[in-house]
Amino acid sequence: MPVKTTCPYCGVGCGVVADRDADGKVTVSGDREHPANFGRLCSKGSALAETIGLEGRLLAPLMNGQPATWDDALDHVAGQFARIIREHGPDAVAFYVSGQLLTEDYYVVNKLSKGFVGTANIDTNSRLCMASSVVGHKRAFGSDTVPGCYEDLEQADLLVLVGSNSAWCHPILHQRMLAAKEKNPACRIVVIDPRRTATCEGADLHLPLRAGSDVMLFNGLLAYLAGNNVIDRDFVGNVTSGVADALAQVAGQTVARTAGACGLTEGTLELFFDWFARTERVVTLYSQGVNQSTSGVDKVNAIINCHLLTGRIGRPGMGPFSLTGQPNAMGGREVGGLANQLAAHMDLENAAHRDIVQRFWRAPVMAEKGGLKAVDMFDAIADGRIKAVWIMSTNPVVSLPDADRVRAALDACELVVVSDCMRHTDTTRHAHVLLPALAWGEKDGTVTNSERRISRQRPFLPPPGEARADWRIVCDVARRMGYAGFDYAAAAEVFREHAELSGFENGGRRDFDISALATCDDQAYEALEPVQWPVTRDAPSGTARMFETPHFFTPDHKARFVAVKPRAARNATSRDYPLVLNTGRVRDQWHTMTRTGKTARLLSHIFEPYAEFHPEDARMAGVKHDGLARLTSPWGKMIARVVVTSEQRRGCVFVPMHWNEEFAGAGRVNALVNPAVDPLSGQPESKHTPVKADPFRPKWHAFILSRNEITRPASGYWVHGQAGNCWRLELTGNERPESWRDWARTQLGLDDVAIEWIAYRDPAAGRYRYAAVRDGRLEGCVFIAPNHTLPSRVWLIGLFAEQELSANARMSLLAGQPFGDGEDRGAIVCSCFGIGRNQITAEIRNGADSVEAIGQCLKAGTNCGGCKPEISKLIATTAIPLPSSAAAAQPQLAGSLTE
Ligand SMILES: Nc1nc2c(c(=O)[nH]1)N[C@H]1C(S)=C(S)[C@@H](COP(=O)(O)OP(=O)(O)OC[C@H]3O[C@@H](n4cnc5c(=O)[nH]c(N)nc54)[C@H](O)[C@@H]3O)O[C@H]1N2
Ligand SMILES: Nc1nc2c(c(=O)[nH]1)N[C@H]1C(S)=C(S)[C@@H](COP(=O)(O)OP(=O)(O)OC[C@H]3O[C@@H](n4cnc5c(=O)[nH]c(N)nc54)[C@H](O)[C@@H]3O)O[C@H]1N2
Ligand code: SF4
Ligand SMILES: [Mo]
């Protein structure tokens, strides 16, 4: 029976249909009826079926690394939490949770902490993600409301993407925008991002602004709009407040001054301002380039100010639009999962709200002041103010800034409890108690996407081992701590309570209201169709757009302009640390890779952690394309593969956030990231850390491909993961073993007599190649060289698919390059069909001159479409040889880093 559920990755919230055949084989496809994606899935969504295997799962509770019964583990957690609270007060314990919990899980843990334990020391990884948007919304609207809906993006004539790489991070929504643009030739897309990202491929204009200068830019826009009289006077006069102060703040800010401060040319900036001024239907979408900043909240309000001045909000095709990251970032906000929130969009610091919630919960004690926000929480763990922490569905040793300090904090903590579905993560290593949680496909509940749409996640797999739902684990502990109010029989019951609270003594005063769902019985919950909140008696089928009648949730019901002043980043670059470290995401990986890192297909696009440099910065630092660089900040260091590209703004280095100690040695970027936070939202400045770079030159480089899993080295630079039908390990070193042959055998763990060894040695050049063949089939190979110039991994990985090596393949193994009819596909661009760069450029040279033409001959780009921006870049940059002249040199492309 096909089951309808929701993708567990990004905030687009795509509907998924999962089916399991009689043999238990699962297939996953897009849900054609889901209003977020209408049947489409991106590369991560398409690969979901490959990530649900049980390898690596945590399937039973562990205490100090030893298997334990649930009873013992729960008694221990409840007993120790109760003791610490008794001895040191409720603020001596903390919960650190996640936007990847379901709303029901989130609701109960927040209830336990704020209403029963009596501490607001519960914070969430959404602090690293959405906190600035929350505060920005509340300052402007009096409530944390995302005004618009996805259809607005299709109805707009101007889409402004600020600090968003939607082509890679919200791919299906991005494709919806591109499709709408195709249909509406008047539609323009502008990208505001210091880097030229894949998102820029389909855009009309890219503004590579100086990192962190967004407030300046939008203040400049506000001044330009006012100066050109692009003001909705009725709207501003009747339903907003504070316009005079906001305009006074930007008075006299000319285009020239703005351009200078943002590092842009006056012409490009004015073009953007002019488009914005002339276009009524404009949506400004923003994501982490805005939120993750010490000016994050101000950036949000600088954007909203421009929409308020022009009255472009609450109408089709217009409005500010915060793109949420995690599948349930919004649900977490609805239940009040942040340390300074209360459930159902109420405020912790508001006594009337506390009273409402306390009576509703029949709570014995209510936390009365905001708790510690993520970064402060881990400081308090480090210095012993917090003695027990329960981490749920997040991997802070990888994802928090100053991550080595986070790790040290956990090591110093008296009791670390971690609920996760994976056994081995950088965080589970530091847990005293590990609690096995159900994963996607097994768990049951609801999530809310970027457009306020609540969708069901439904199980289609049996619960494995002893894993339990997160909400249930929380309730099991709460009951053991003696608290009433945690006797839910099923997720549906939790949902009903949450829905009821949203309507409780609401009377239209609070935006979040889904009270019409409070009476849904188990069957109705099971069948719940995707619906956008508010869902009330007046709007039983949900609400697409907020503020259609401009009634805001401020005391005077007016939207507020906020006068915002541009500020420099907290930690500026200096002579010692001259570069700005910017961090973010890659197309095929999800955060700390615990799930997307399980599939070879998703690792094939980019295998290694990398650092992107502008050519001039690379030259100054002495680092070379394809070589290795060591990056150092005052907080930590890492090593990454160098990519030199003029797509990077001068003075900035970009490193992905994903790699960690499960996948790479020295590849965890958050070890370097500064823990500076926005003063209002507490959101860390993940996009701006001063760093320096210098070349990392080990004496030898090697890679190993093996059918059996390869042991990860204990130190140095290495990267490990699955590749096709084998495992792949990249490694480097300075010590040379006595015999490379013995070393190769040990690494592969193969030395039986049935193995036939193919070997090539060139000691003078420091090159060695070993391949192990059993019954004609390749079992493993080891290649060693003095530099990174080693044979194509993609081609060698392909040999593992063959049952018997051909004579050509054997020759090729020795030669270290494809021989005869062997083909080197090059770095994989299309992960759905495994199509490489060399194949695509060959077709381009043969005359394929559009993304569609490439799709027709190679299929690349015809499934999820996520690689289309890269294909179109290849088309734009591949030199077509002229019949009379020699082939022109091919420009360097970021794509080569997967090699
Ligand atoms: N493939 C993939 N998709 C994901 C995720 C994932 O892990 N992998 N995670 C999901 C989550 S939780 C989130 S929060 C979203 C994040 O989605 P995005 O915010 O789109 O992704 P990021 O790569 O973090 O950052 C976006 C861009 O901000 C730019 N930027 C840096 N500094 C500045 C600045 O000062 N100003 C401006 N204007 N831009 C700047 C960066 O160069 C980067 O291109 O993605 C979601 N989707
Ligand atoms: N430098 C830098 N750092 C960043 C960012 C950045 O752009 N740059 N982005 C930040 C942002 S926006 C985010 S959202 C965070 C994300 O950072 P994290 O939340 O730390 O990353 P994930 O890998 O998503 O961690 C989820 C964990 O929960 C587990 N898990 C998955 N499903 C379940 C479940 O149902 N129950 C339980 N109990 N566990 C589960 C997974 O195995 C994994 O260990 O990273 C932040 N850190
Ligand atoms: S865009 Fe991709 S990752 Fe995001 S919800 Fe849709 S399928 Fe999942
Ligand atoms: Mo996020």
Image (cartoon, rainbow, N blue to C red):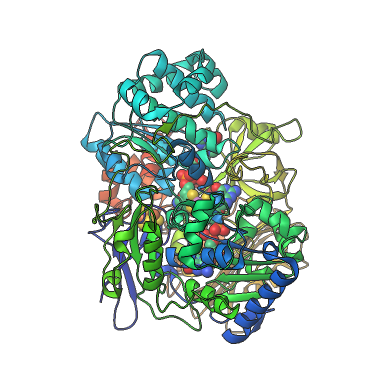
* In the rendered image, the vertical position of residue 774 relative to residue 821, given as above or below: below
Of 641 and 25, nearer the camera is 25
Quadrant housing residue 808: bottom left
Horizontal side of residue 522 vs 411, given as left or right: left
Judge whether 224 appears above or below 849 on screen: above
Whether residue 56 is visible to the viewer of this picture, yes or no, is no
Report the front residue among 887 and 807: 887
In the displayed structure, does residue 161 sit left or right of residue 518?
A: right
Q: Quadrant of the N terminus?
A: bottom left
Q: Residue at x 61, y 52 (%)?
A: 370
The percent coordinates of residue 540 (x first, y second) are: 24, 56
**Above or below 692: residue 247:** above
Measuring from the top left, give residue 24's x and y in whole percent: 34, 81
Q: Pick the residue in front: 655 or 263.
A: 263
Seen in the image, is 529 located left or right of residue 449? Answer: left
Q: Position of residue 155 (x, y in %)?
A: 25, 37
Q: Quadrant of residue 93?
A: bottom right
Give the residue at x 78% y 60%: 735
Q: Work out whether residue 257 can be spotted.
A: yes
Q: Who's the residue at 44% across and 23% down the image? A: 243
